[in-house]
């Protein structure tokens, strides 16, 4: 068995911790946490924003650190910090202490998620990257499946302290996953004497030891690894001067802004507008998780075949419909259809973005490129919850909030259709990267 499969399994568990628990667990805990801390919708939105600000700050830095020191150490330390932040959130007595602890959890999430997704570009060849990234993002789906029944049970079992127990549990599990990731992950296939999975024998990686002489590898190593082979100086200009990377970043904003609104107030809207119980909301959360289980694999594979831009436009269109249904059809059928549609496409956009970064700038600089565009994504995420909370308080309902999310997703469609939609080629990311 190729070691890439173990790396992929560990990466999926990293996503389970840094996104599934740290971010998506918040949506189910929110109603109980609001009551415990006496928060209105604006306060709840600001609490979500605090974690996302931390994520934004460490998203680009995490990618840069991974390019310098290797993703393995950065991922493990980041995931450990996320776990500590979640555990401390359970100790919060005021909004301000919760803001600080969620900020720490957010920083850890950004420092671990971005490098681990970029790492897959080193272990999988261009034709397998979309598939691999799609598998990794199912970590979020597994979290939804687990949290859907678990969180309501804990909230009922521990009453007023239930939301605290949830954060304690999330923190301990995430720290354990940080230790596991450090044991399993490796920075590069060469550390195991291997080549990336799916890379043909006639395709040479920059600095590949199987190339005939160092010169052969060095000659083609411009861009992803710089002149001088695999360990050469990183070509930072291949990231920050690439028009294609900047375009990806602006398209990514729409996803960050729209999906975080949907997930943050998901349970609250079901309870307030649909009359759901906490347990009923958790069940629909779990249903969404089951339907999202293979969404990244499906859309990642589609992007490998039809091109990244077309695949992104399709996902954004499905999201726009799902968000709109949540607003205009406040009934069990409408809520369920919305959750199913979102689930079928939920985590595909991060998977496609991760694969696209590997295509554009090469496998070594993929974490840095993904970190850079994730900064744009994080800006959208940061603005989304607090803007949505303020809008909900002003309108007295969450209905216009979901219409706003639908409009933002439509903006993503427009941005995606203008991307250069080329199918990944054999030489993608093995030679001079695209300048955009």
Image (cartoon, rainbow, N blue to C red):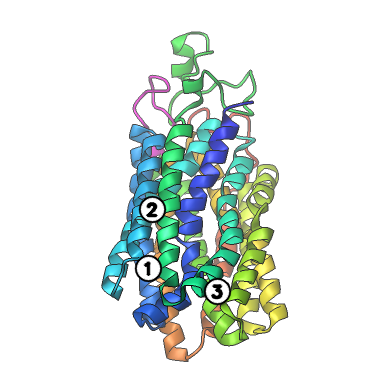
Which of disc 2 and disc 1 is earlier in sequence? 1
Q: Is residue 69 left or right of residue 282?
A: left
Q: Which residue is mark 3?
A: 266
Can you give x and y, in whole percent of width and height, for residue 198 in the image?
A: 64, 29
Cβ atoms at labels 3 and 1 below 8 Å apart: no
Looking at the image, the residue that sits furthest to the top is: 213
Residue range (magenta): 224-238
Q: CA distance from mark 3 to mark 1?
A: 16 Å
Looking at the image, the residue that sits furthest to the front is: 157
Q: Secondary structure at mark 3?
A: helix
* Foreground: disc 3 or disc 2: 2
Position of the N terminus by quadrant: top right
Quarter of the image where one finds residue 35: bottom left
Which of disc 1 and disc 3 is earlier in sequence? 1
**On screen, residue 418 above or below 35:** above
What kind of secondary structure does the magenta stretch mostly adopt? loop
* Foreground: disc 3 or disc 1: 3
**Residue density around tag 2, few if under 14, some if 14–19, many if 20 or more, within 10 Å:** many
Q: Which residue is mark 1?
A: 49
Q: CA distance from mark 3 to mark 2?
A: 23 Å
Can you give x and y, in whole percent of width and height, for residue 403 in the image?
A: 56, 79
**Residue density around tag 1, few if under 14, some if 14–19, many if 20 or more, within 10 Å:** many
* Foreground: disc 1 or disc 2: 2
Which label sits on residue 83? 2
């Amino acid at each position: 068995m190729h070691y890439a499969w173990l790396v992929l399994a560990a990466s999926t568990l990293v996503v389970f911790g840094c996104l599934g628990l740290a971010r998506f667990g918040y949506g189910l805990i929110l109603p109980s946490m609001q009551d415990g801390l006496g928060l209105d919708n604006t306060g709840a939105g600001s609490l979500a924003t605090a974690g996302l600000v931390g994520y934004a700050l460490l998203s680009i830095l995490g990618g840069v650190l991974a390019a310098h020191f290797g993703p393995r150490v950065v991922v493990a330390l980041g995931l450990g910090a996320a776990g500590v932040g979640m555990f401390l959130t359970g100790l919060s007595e005021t909004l301000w202490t919760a803001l600080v602890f969620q900020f720490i959890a957010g920083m850890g999430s950004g420092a671990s998620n971005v490098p681990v997704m970029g790492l897959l570009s080193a272990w999988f060849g261009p034709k397998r990257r979309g598939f691999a990234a799609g598998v990794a993002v199912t970590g979020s789906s597994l979290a939804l499946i687990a949290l859907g029944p678990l969180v309501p049970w804990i909230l009922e079992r521990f009453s007023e302290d239930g939301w605290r127990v949830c954060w304690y549990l999330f923190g301990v599990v995430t720290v354990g996953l940080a230790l596991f990731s450090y044991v399993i992950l490796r920075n590069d296939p060469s550390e195991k004497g291997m080549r990336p999975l799916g890379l043909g024998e006639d395709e040479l990686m920059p600095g590949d030891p199987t190339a005939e002489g160092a010169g052969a590898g060095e000659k083609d190593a411009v861009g992803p690894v710089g002149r001088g082979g695999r360990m050469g100086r990183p070509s930072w200009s291949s990231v920050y001067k690439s028009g294609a990377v900047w375009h990806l970043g602006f398209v990514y904003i729409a996803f960050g802004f729209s999906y975080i609104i949907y997930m943050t107030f998901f349970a609250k809207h079901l309870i307030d507008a649909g009359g759901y119980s906490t347990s009923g909301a958790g069940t629909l959360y779990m249903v969404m998780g089951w339907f999202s289980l293979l969404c990244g694999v499906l859309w990642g594979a589609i992007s490998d075949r039809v091109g990244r831009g077309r695949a992104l436009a399709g996902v954004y269109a499905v999201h726009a419909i799902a968000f709109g249904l949540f607003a205009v059809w406040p009934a069990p059928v409408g809520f369920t259809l919305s959750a199913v549609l979102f689930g079928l496409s939920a985590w595909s956009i991060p998977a496609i973005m991760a694969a696209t970064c590997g295509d554009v700038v090469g496998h070594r600089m993929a974490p840095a490129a993904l970190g850079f565009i994730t900064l744009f994504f994080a800006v959208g995420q940061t603005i989304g919850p607090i803007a949505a909370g303020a809008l909900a308080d002003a309108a007295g309902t969450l209905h216009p909030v979901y219409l706003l999310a639908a409009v933002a997703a439509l903006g993503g469609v427009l941005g995606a259709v203008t991307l250069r939609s080329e199918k990944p080629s054999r030489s993608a990311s093995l030679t001079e990267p695209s300048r955009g």
